[in-house]
Image (cartoon, helix red, strand yellow):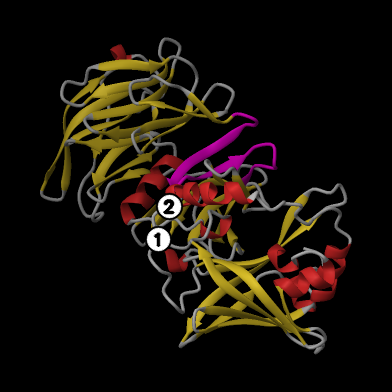
Amino acid sequence: MKRKLLTVLLVLSMVLGLCACGSDKKEAPKEDTAKEEKESEEEAEPEKPAHEAGDIVGQWKCTSMTTDDLGTLTSEDCKELLGYDMLATISFTGWETGNCAFSVIEEDEEGEERTAELAMLWTEENDSYTLTLENPEVTESYSGAAAAFDGEILILTLKSAAGEGDEAYQFEYAGEPKVSIYNFAPEFTEEDVRKMSAFSSGGYAIVADDMAYGYEAHGKLACAKISKDGSDVVLDDVQALLDGEICNPANFQYEEGYVYATVNGEKNLGIVKINVKNNKTEFLYDKAVEYQQVYDGKLYFTDENHHYCSMDLDGKNITPIIDDREVYYPYQVGDGWIVFQDDADGETLHVYHVGEKIEKKITEVRSYNPVICGEYLYFDTTEDFEQYHLGRVNLRTWETEMSEYVNNGAKFIDGDYLFMESTYYTLDEWNQNLDKDLNSCEYRYYYSDGNYRFYNTSFECWFSPGENFGGYSAQLWLDE
């Protein structure tokens, strides 16, 4: 956003420079008026519940503005002075996430309309709102902002940094807020966090109906009956699936009696569906595939071109979602939003809304293994693929923090704990020196459901008790 873009004088000069921005709508012939009014009444939508006075959340239409130099201008004043309703270009939106934006529609050099936004964060205090400016460059023009209500009218005040007089804008409620990057606010439960951790870690195992399905140490697809003897895990009847062929299974998902997994072997390639009642398998897809996720009754995955697709759980109706670039780690997080790594954009993380085609880059460094927990998205970054640093993005402010210490990039979040390099600690302690052997793969966790964990140690795969580390583990292993 350019400096002082939103000051009144610049808005005025911008509007004066517009070409053919007014409306040439003609008055309807009198004989058609009654008919149009009747049709309008028939097509009118049901009345929505009234907006609660004093609630900043919503879309807001500007009705007037006040400055020291110009006094108060209404829409009629703008039309008379400028021949154009300048206030129609100004709006305000508040979202439940605590974000809000003051917006002005402008034209670029080619005459195309675009929206310039002054992004802020709101906090409610008694009967007024404190607004915090997000863009540091804007503070050169504005020292602060505030919002308050006069009845049902929202009054936004932008305070001049140079002491040249404040700007006050009056708004009336115009409806619910539209989808925006500012209402990207996944609300993850502990189960959601575990699922995303398992997905980002490769999804090498899953427990369904007391059966363990996973990557067996030889690279085969295996399953076993799982139970506990006190605090110990017991695996019975370990058996190989897909004729015991090496297929490097991954991306395990479960939905309504079936386990879905991706396989990448010489004889078996694609997506396999396993009936947990009898372990009967069938193929839904027979090409290279990665990053499979079951969400809201559909399978999502990247195809052999690393394009993002969906299909029905029976393998039908394959539909492209992002097919203009290579994407990695794509993950549905709810309400139409996806987190993914954009390969062409420096392997940075983006968020994307499928329906509205809204997209935002949220990291500036190479970012891997994203996991959302609370108000943060945690990720790993590296330059040499040997030493990694842990980073996190605040999904409310978009601020990024980086750990100063190195690790092996093998994180897993379970509850309030971060598991990494043979140890675990609370998320509050995420930025600390682990002082571990970076080349060790001891206790690299890949799955947890709160009852059981699946981990790798010395390239052998084990299940262990999930609630503590006091019990013994059982190895998922097929004798050859």
Query: Could you tell whether 239 is left or right of 301 in the image?
Result: left
Question: Which residue is pictured at 36% across the width and 27% down the height?
Answer: 261
The residue at which mark 1 appears reads as 48
* Viewer-nearest residue: 425 or 60: 60
Identify residue type, mark 2. Answer: Glu
Residue found at the far left of this picture: 229
Work out which quarter of the rendered image holds the C terminus and state it.
top left
Residue shown at the point (86%, 54%) measured from the top left: 19
In magenta stretch: residue 325: yes
Q: Position of residue 453 (x, y in %)?
A: 29, 45
> 10 Å neighbourhood of mark 1: few (<14), some, or many (≥20)?
few
Q: Secondary structure at mark 2?
A: loop
Tell me how many marks there are.
2
Q: CA distance from mark 1 to mark 2?
A: 8 Å
Using the rendered image of the protein, determine whether residue 3 is visible from the camera's viewpoint: no
The percent position of residue 293, horizontal first and vertical second, equals: 40, 35
> Please, what is the three-letter code of the amino acid marked with disc 1?
Lys
Q: Which residue is disc 2 drawn over?
A: 45
Q: Give the residue drawn at x 64%, y 73%.
A: 63
Residue 167 placement, left or right of 378: right
**Image position of 206 with respect to 145: above or below:** above
224, 328: nearer the viewer:
328
* Region of the chain picked out in magenta, as a range: 323-349
Discs 1, 2 touching: Cβ within 8 Å: yes
Is residue 171 in sight in this rendering?
A: yes
